[in-house]
Image (cartoon, grey):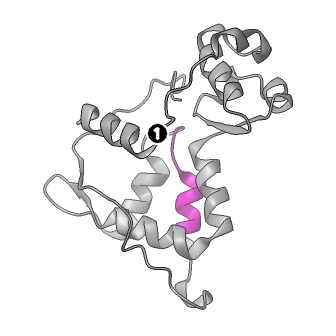
Amino acid sequence: KIERTCRLMRDAISDYDVVGYADLAAATGNTDAKDRHVAAAAIACTPSTLITWNIKDFDKLTLSNEGVSVETPDHLLCRVFDGNPALVHAAAEKAYGFVRKNGGKPSWPDYLDILATRGAPSSLKEFAKRLRTFIPEDVPEQISTSEMDTDLVEVEEVVEPPASGPKGGK
């Protein structure tokens, strides 16, 4: 599966491979040594946003001065949702339509609970809260997601991160 996903990503984004970032490692400030290559690649792509659960290991101030923002997946999804709630809610509903767990489909509230709690603290708690409180009637026109490219997602097992939190989730 991962090989297929990588191929699809390469096919969808022609300039996916970041080159020439090694010399930028010194510009990453106090970013943890094991994460400097990631921060340097983000600098090479500025302006950019580095999405990670591991924000504590990145020097956000220095990276910001280099044109890189650092945020969690939950924050990114909330920001995108706030910009276009109807579209993001419709996309979440479409993604939900492809989720299967243990041979069945969770209810929408159960799905939102999964988003909000699985992998805690690496969860989508705030994003799930926005999805849960969204009222489509408040939006003049529902957005079509018929052109979104989605695949069936099988949820077989959730691996909980260690108590100290996730590592290297970039």
Q: Amino acid at mark 1?
A: Ser
Residue 65: image location, x then y, percent? 86, 29
Whether residue 158 can be seen here: no
In the displayed structure, 136 sits above or below 93; it is below
Residue nearer the viewer, 56 or 91 = 91
Q: In the rendered view, does 78 fall on the left or right side of 67?
A: left
Q: Can residue 133 be seen at all in this image of the molecule?
A: yes
Residue under numbered circle 1:
14
- Identify the residue shown where x is 44% and y is 79%: 144
Residues rendered magenta in the picture: 122-132
Along the horizontal axis of the image, is 5 left or right of 53? left
Q: Is residue 126 magenta?
A: yes
Quadrant where the N terminus sits is top left
Viewer-nearest residue: 98 or 156: 98
Label 1 element class: loop
Query: Going 51% across and 28% down the picture, which residue do you hit?
Result: 169
Say which residue appears at 50% left-offset and 25% top-offset.
163
Quadrant assignment, res 11: top left
Residue 100 is a magenta residue? no
Pinpoint residue 58: horizontal percent, then vertical percent. Answer: 70, 23
The image quadrant of residue 29 is top right
Q: Main secondary structure of the magenta part?
A: helix
